[in-house]
Amino acid sequence: MTFNIKVIIATLLASSTLLLAQPAMAEAYATSPNLGNAPMEGTETFQAFGGKEGLIKIMDDFMIGLVADPRTTKFFNNEKQTFIKAMLVEQMCELMNGGCKYPGRDMKTSHANMKVNREAFNALVEQFQFAMDKHNVPFSAQNKLLAKLAPMYREIETTTGDAVPPKVLAN
Amino acid sequence: MSRTKLSAASIKLPRESNNKPNIMINCCMALAIAAIYSGQTHAENMPHSNKLLLTGGVSQVEGAAGGGLTPWAVIGGYGTNNEIGGSAHYTYVDTDDYNLDTYGFTVGLFDRVEFSVAEQRFNVNNLRDKVEAAFPGAIGRNNLKQTIVCVKVRVAGEAVLDADTWMPQIAVGLQYKENDDTDFIKSAVVGAKSDHGTDVYLAATKLLLDKNLLLNGTIRFTKANQFGLLGFGGDKHDSYQPMLELSAAYLLRKDFAIGAEYRMKPDNLRSPLNAALGPNAIDLKEDDAFDIFVAYAPTKNISLTAAYVNLGNIATVKPVGADFGNQVGVYVSAQIGF
């Protein structure tokens, strides 16, 4: 009986140590808390995008497409384009394990000021595919990044009704 | 513009020879058309094509969205969860001794419910030519015909976007089939027990986006002989059996996929005439089917599928020299979506 209690106490101690160790281990990898998904392991995909310079060029064309597309223009045709592009570069770079730190807000908070539906979400994916195609990112590398981004629809989409553009905040 | 295509396809669908299923088909078409027109009132803010390319699958041989042979859990058309989508399709299968035409349309409502109606014409004139000399009138017509009305409901999951979980998209479906050639399929040549039947299936579809791979598994409960073209049930077997159907597609580009499918089929028929003609004189043993396909979607409005298909044995009548044991051939399909 006493032996059994000792075993139970030891097990409890060991498991609580493991539980305590868990956040410390996450800290060591230091993924940005608002990144939205776990970064990739290798850097092949990041290389396929042409590194950070490649990403910057892709995001420039991506934004042009988003503003031109009638399904997404109301979300992007505003004065925040430069900021959004810079945030996207950091986020994509970190997701592809490119040595960046995404400093932005989480996906839920950053989209809370608007209503995004599936139509707008998919339109954005299509414009991103066009921009990646234009910069000759191989299809399989595109899909590796899209696989990291697609699940974010759960935080980004807030309506199954009409898409509503971001509210202009008075500052 | 695609609405005119749809009505053109639906006009062809009413059947001429047999009047019982017309009510059902008309009712279903009316429902589908009503759904489309009710959608039209908010057509301005309700575009119809915002699903990602090829993610609605193509039209499988019975008219549901899927691969070529098997229904998938995806909802047909390019409509998202606040849109209505649909497509009209034509499929032609040409094997060594038979060919099959299928045409119909599919409507997807809010990425949740799918309705489809299809008509199949199975051309048996090669067999009929040979049989006619020995057994005049045994096969009444060159074309056997059946109508298929399907409904599918997505019950869980998101096949494309849930890339961080193993949870597939899951759907349940029904395929009601009614064969026009009652006299022939229930005759002593074929010996089917019924001219109509309902297949029930559960499909699970998963896009492994980071691997460019789409996988589908479907389990179908059915009594259909050769998809229903030779009726339902037979002397060998006359009850529902579970059949496994598998598809795998590899995406080479966002508009181009290659893949393979396998569809298990029941083996219900034993010709009653064999009692007189000798065992297996008329061989109706049914084999599993498989195909290897390429699918290409140059735009969201058009997708084209071509496949090598093997249907195995369908109907062989050895005493008259109709040695049609292994039906291998091509499958081509075009789909116009909206």
Image (spheres, grey):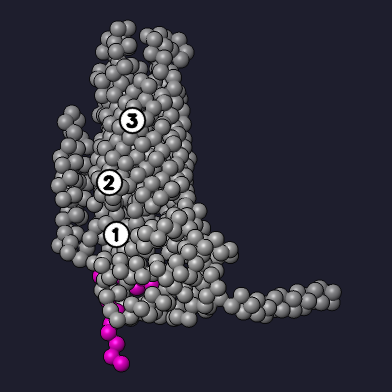
- Residue extending furthest toward the bottom: A171
Of circles 3 and 2, the one toward us is 2
Q: Is residue B241 visible?
A: no
B89 or A91: nearer the viewer: A91
Dot label at residue B93:
3
Q: Residue at x 20, y 35 (%)?
A: B20
* Secondary structure at numbered mark 3: strand
Q: Are marks 3 and 2 in contact (CB under 8 Å)?
A: no
Give whichever of discs 3 and 1 has the lower sequence position.
1
Q: Are marks 3 and 1 in contact (CB under 8 Å)?
A: no
Q: Chain of mark 1?
A: B
Residue ID for mark 1: B50
* Secondary structure at numbered mark 1: loop
How dense is the environment of label 3, judged by Cα within 10 Å: few (below 14), some, or many (20 and up)? many
Q: Amino acid at mark 3?
A: Val
Dot label at residue B302:
2
Q: Main secondary structure of the magenta part?
A: loop
Q: Amino acid at mark 1?
A: Asn
Q: Residue at x 34, y 73 (%)?
A: A158
Q: Residue at x 43, y 35 (%)?
A: B291
Location of residue B176 in the rendering, given as x and y in whole percent from the top left corner: 31, 40
| Picture layout, residue B330 above or below residue B294 | above
* Residue B104 in which image quadrant: top left
